[in-house]
Image (tube, rainbow, N blue to C red):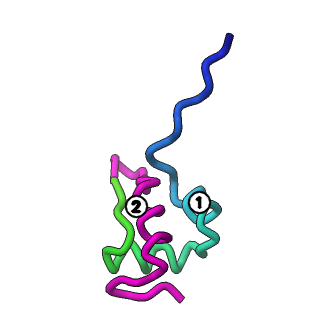
Amino acid sequence: MIDPQPERITVRIREACRMTGIGRSKLYELIGAGEIEVVKIGALTLVPVASLRKLIERGGQGAGDVK
């Protein structure tokens, strides 16, 4: 029997955009405003899935409202 893949805890920028429906520029704007956390490993930028969930749960109610 094959074990199911574990749930990912981080995604790349492109995947974060696809998951949320937020455009790349807006995503970087939210990252710059501290609304979305990122993890940098060398040149690789990873977005914690938990950070994306928090953004959606807040419904944009943060320092820079999502529009």
The residues tagged by marks 1 and 2 sit, at their Cα atoms, a distance apart of 15 Å
**Mark 1 or mark 2, earlier in chain:** 1
Query: Height in image: 40 above or below 36?
Result: above
Amino acid residing under circle 1? Arg
Rendered location of residue 19, percent (x, y): 61, 60
Q: Which residue bears the numbered disc 2?
A: 51
Q: Which mark is residue 14?
A: 1
* Drawn side of residue 36 relative to residue 26, left or right: left
Amino acid residing under circle 2? Ser
Q: Nearer the viewer, mark 1 or mark 2?
A: 2
Rendered location of residue 53, percent (x, y): 47, 62
In this view, the residue in front, 64 or 25, is: 64
Q: Residues within 10 Å of mark 2 (few under 14, many from 20)?
A: some
In this view, the residue in front, 34 or 57, is: 57
The stretch in magenta equals 40-67
Q: Residue shown at 50%/70% (left/top)?
A: 56
Residue 31, quarter of picture: bottom left
Whether the magenta-drawn stretch holds residue 35 is answered as: no
Whether the magenta-drawn stretch holds residue 46 is answered as: yes
Q: Residue shown at 60%/75% (left/top)?
A: 23
* Drawn side of residue 25 relative to residue 63, left or right: right
Q: Residue shown at 50%/41% (left/top)?
A: 8
Query: Height in image: 1 above or below 33?
Result: above
Q: How many marks?
A: 2
Q: Residues within 10 Å of mark 1 (few under 14, many from 20)?
A: some
